[in-house]
Amino acid sequence: MKHSAWLILAAIVLVQSPLWSESKPPGGDYPGVADPFSDPSQYEFSDEERDDKEFFHLGRFLMIGVDLGAGIFTGGLGSTASPAFLIGGRLIYFFDKALALEGRLSFSTHQDLIVAGSSTTDLDVSLFSAGGGFRYYFDTKSAPRAIAIANPFLAVGAGIYSRNFTGSGPLAGLLAASSSFGAYGGAGVEFLIYRKHIYLGMDLRYHMVFFPDESATFSGTVAAGSRGGDYMSTAATLTYSF
């Protein structure tokens, strides 16, 4: 009789409490994959991929910006040509969180003075540059907060630098407009100032330009090499991220 009572109790429990398999939760569907031989790792994302997805979700896939700053000649050119106001623009396309492609334009107008014996030549020198290159942004996950919010980067690239001369004096006619090849390297920072879309930054670059008159003697009136030099640019940047 005792054994019969236990059997009846067990039957009641089984009827009122359905059994669930080990992998099927109560009230839910079977969560397995369709292909039992597939590799589970293909459904998982690496930390780097996850960071990139979050990065692009918050913007920074495509950026457009303006530059306002100063252009400065170096060497012999820097001793005669004054620094000038620089205006420019840039377009930045991100491949991933660290690497971006950059296209840039800039324009500045300088005052130059050439002394040859007892005569002088006053010149207005306009410099227009167009080029492109790459930016590399550092991983700042483990960096101090002051560095992390600055979004530091390095920039390298090359371009064409066009100069045009206007002025008066005995040497004015000897300086013709020219376009020269150059390469640049620099660094900068970008601080987020508005809703993941607007960044305020600083940018400093050195441009090694092969100006054609670097070794010119101007018929013996100007010493060879005195017109040599390169170019530096420093600017405050305002950038919008789509």
Image (spheres, grey):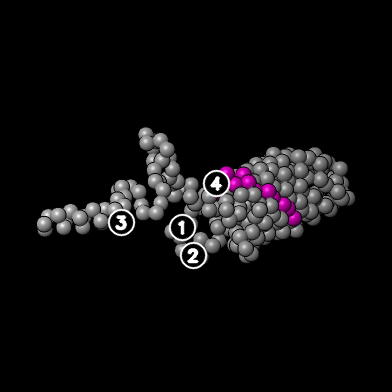
Q: What's under tag 1, amino acid-wise?
A: Lys
For mark 3, what is the residue?
16
* Viewer-side label of 1, 3: 3
Q: Residues within 10 Å of mark 2 (few under 14, many from 20)?
A: few
Residue at 54 percent of width and 62 percent of height: 149
* Viewer-side label of 3, 2: 3
Q: What's under tag 2, amino acid-wise?
A: Arg
Residue at 48 percent of width and 57 percent of height: 140
Q: Secondary structure at mark 1?
A: loop
User: What stretch of residues is rendered in magenta?
Assistant: 87-101
- In the displayed image of the protein, which residue is found farthest to the top? 37
* Viewer-side label of 3, 4: 3
Residue at 61 percent of width and 60 percent of height: 196
For mark 2, what is the residue?
145
For mark 1, what is the residue?
141
Q: Secondary structure at mark 4?
A: loop
